[in-house]
Amino acid sequence: MDTNSLCPRCGGAFMCEAETALQAPCACFAVQLSDAARALLRERYTTCLCVACLRAVQAALEAAPDQAVTPPTPSRMA
């Protein structure tokens, strides 16, 4: 079932389709994440992030692998 979600990193709304991946792949499946990005995401978040935030976390780690990746201020809180 598709799930309307709020990204815990940016507060933006997005559609999580991870549970229906056999019918139509979720957009996040196309995002290539390093092991470091996956570890950071598991450490900080318990739910899915939007594709833009997944890409931003990966890009930040690629740009400065030894620096902490800080989340943006959420635009709205759930």
Image: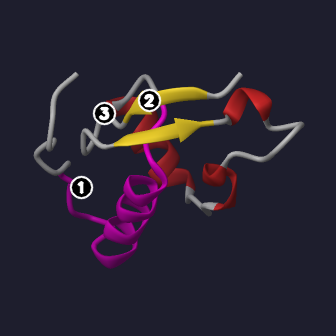
Q: How far apart are marks 3 and 2 (CA)?
A: 9 Å
Q: In which quarter of the image is residue 46?
A: top left
Q: Quadrant of residue 11?
A: top left
Residue to which mark 3 is pinned = 8
Q: What residue type is labelled 2?
A: Ser
- Residue 26 is situated, as x and y percent measured from the top left of the image, at 69, 45
Relative horizontal placement of residue 34, taking residue 67 as reference (left or right): right
Q: What residue type is labelled 1?
A: Val
Q: Which amino acid does label 3 sit on?
A: Pro
Residue visible at 23% across and 21% down in the picture? 78
Q: How far apart are marks 2 and 1 (CA)?
A: 22 Å
Q: Does the magenta stretch include residue 54?
A: yes
Range of residues picked out in magenta: 48-70
Q: Is residue 35 magenta?
A: no
Crowdedness near tag 2: few (<14), some (14–19) or many (≥20) residues, C-alpha within 10 Å: some
Residue to which mark 2 is pinned = 5
Residue to which mark 1 is pinned = 69
- Residue 14 is situated, as x and y percent measured from the top left of the image, at 45, 42
